Amino acid sequence: MKMGIGNKTNAYYGITSTGAQFWNSFPRGVEGDVLPRLERRLEELKDIADDPRKIAQDYIDSIDAKCFHQIQAQTELEDLIDFESLDLGDIENLIDDMFCQMIATKT
């Protein structure tokens, strides 16, 4: 399940487990969205419960999906910075001055 975490400006999506607070905090309307997914997942787990290899593969797939979502969230944050129009102002001048001083001391 994906949920927004944090304030709107710094929010990110992540995978989270559900607990008592989740079920007590959300209205009954969530049952129509969440319960069908949980029931499908339960059926999938029942189908693989007798085969340790399938359980292991399911675990690997779930870890891969979690890592994929984490990497995707991190790269999306990097995409938000527009380096072409980023105004560094005084920092660029400071770097230029330091570079010029470094060259002047070497010659």
Image (cartoon, grey):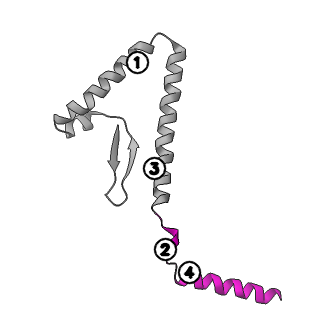
Which mark is nearer the camera, 4 or 2?
A: 2
Q: Identify the mark nearer the N-term, 2 or 3.
A: 3
Q: CA distance from mark 3 to mark 1?
A: 28 Å
Task: Please tell me which residue is depicted at 49% across the width and 52% down the height of the picture.
Answer: 74
First to last magenta residue range: 81-107
Q: Secondary structure at mark 2?
A: helix
Q: CA distance from mark 3 to mark 4?
A: 29 Å
According to the picture, the residue beneath numbered tag 1 turns out to be: 45
For this view, does 45 lie left or right of residue 85? left
Residues under numbered marks 4 and 1 in contact, where contact means CB atoms less than 8 Å apart: no
Q: Which mark is residue 91?
A: 4
Residue farthest top in this picture: 50
- Mark 3, residues whose alpha carbon is within 10 Å: few (<14), some, or many (≥20)? some
According to the picture, the residue beneath numbered tag 2 turns out to be: 85
Q: CA distance from mark 4 to mark 2?
A: 15 Å
Task: Please tell me which residue is depicted at 27% across the width and 31% down the height of the picture.
Answer: 34
Q: Which mark is residue 73?
A: 3
Residues under numbered marks 3 and 1 in contact, where contact means CB atoms less than 8 Å apart: no
For this view, does 51 lie left or right of residue 45? right
Q: Amino acid at mark 3?
A: Ala
